[in-house]
Amino acid sequence: MSYKKLIFVSGKGGVGKSTISLILARMLHQQGKRVLLVEMGERSSAEHLAELKGVSGYLPQATPLGFQWVRLTGLDCLTDYVGSYVKVEKIAKSFFDNPLIKTLINLAPGLEDLAILGKLTSGIRHHGPAYNFDHIIIDAHSTGSFTSMLRAPRALANMVSMGPLHSQSENIDKVLFDGEHAQYFFVSLLEDLPLEELLESVDEFRRDFKVKPTVVLNKVLPELTRVQEGTPWAAFILNLKHKQQARVGPLTSQFPEAKAQGFIAEPLAQYLQNKKGDDLRTLFKNS
């Protein structure tokens, strides 16, 4: 599978989108690519799942897994953008420390979302301080919040009819959906409720953005022949596997290019350390 510059990973809460983001980052690094993993917001899943340590900010940090990592907030990106013009970081930070400015930012619909998307697309658009990586993997918000975020550039471009904010919003929207620079992964589990939510999310995404995301099914159990009868939990595992197989059938025609990540039975940090760069496997053998 070929990977684009921007790789957004989303999904409903609890399906493992952060795990898939980390696996993709490690995989592409092992394939010799310069990779940046981006988390959004104040809380980090990578710190817990992969035992990474760091703080939020717009400067990437090295990790023991080879790829670099950054945790972005809208305020971080706005500060970075203003700082690129005034050339003094303290002045930029003091500007956004002003209570009135903070209030205006909070009231401005989509401004922080636009700032993050602007930062992520800056290198492609040749506007503002850019990240110099082959791939930027974004551990995005859950699908509902994520689709709202992606609507921000288009909404602001329609709200502001002219000027830099209008043109830059249009350019960000173009990069996100021109099919050349960005791709989208929607993660789910082979369980009834997550699959129902996946179908709804994919339909909404295709309708709103005219883009078909790649589906990744997480925690797919191994083939039945690899589960030894008589071992602890064998009956439980076999029952789950039968249920997964029953749910896979209807997905064949809808998502023929779906990818699968097997169940990880060891700490994720250890799994990532041992990963050798192999790609996510295709779920359907005839694809």
Image (tube, rainbow, N blue to C red):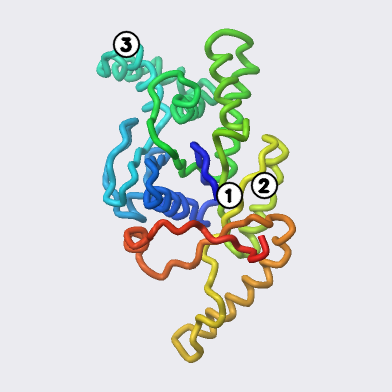
Quarter of the rendering occupied by the C terminus: bottom right
Q: Residue at x 38, y 60 (%)?
A: 275
Residue flagged by tag 2: what amino acid is it? Val
Q: Residue at x 31, y 32 (%)?
A: 59
- Residue 32, given in percent of the width and then of the height, sits at 37, 47
Residue flagged by tag 1: what amino acid is it? Phe
First reached walking from the N terminus: tag 3 or tag 1: 3
Q: Which mark is residue 86?
A: 3
- The residues bearing labels 3 and 1 have C-alpha atoms spaced at a distance of 39 Å
Please tell me which residue lies in front, 159 or 117.
Answer: 117
Category of crowding for the residue at label 1, using alpha-carbon neighbours closer than 10 angstroms: few (below 14), some (14–19), many (at least 20): many
Is there a contact, CB below 8 Å, between mark 1 and mark 2?
Answer: yes
Q: Is residue 245 left or right of residue 119?
A: right
Q: Is residue 209 left or right of residue 119?
A: right
Is there a contact, CB below 8 Å, between mark 3 and mark 1?
Answer: no
Relative to 73, say whether 18 is above or below.
below
- Residue 10, given in percent of the width and then of the height, sits at 54, 46
Q: Residue furthest top?
A: 163
Please tell me which residue lies in front, 12 or 127.
Answer: 127
Relative to 249, say whether 51 is above or below.
above
First reached walking from the N terminus: tag 2 or tag 3: 3
Question: For mark 1, what is the residue?
Answer: 186
Q: Residue at x 70, y 36 (%)?
A: 210
Please tell me which residue lies in front, 110 or 209.
Answer: 209
Category of crowding for the residue at label 2, using alpha-carbon neighbours closer than 10 angstroms: few (below 14), some (14–19), many (at least 20): some
- The residues bearing labels 1 and 2 have C-alpha atoms spaced at a distance of 8 Å
Secondary structure, mark 3, is helix
Q: Residue at x 41, y 70 (%)?
A: 265
Q: Which mark is residue 202?
A: 2
Q: Residue furthest bottom?
A: 230
Secondary structure, mark 1, is strand
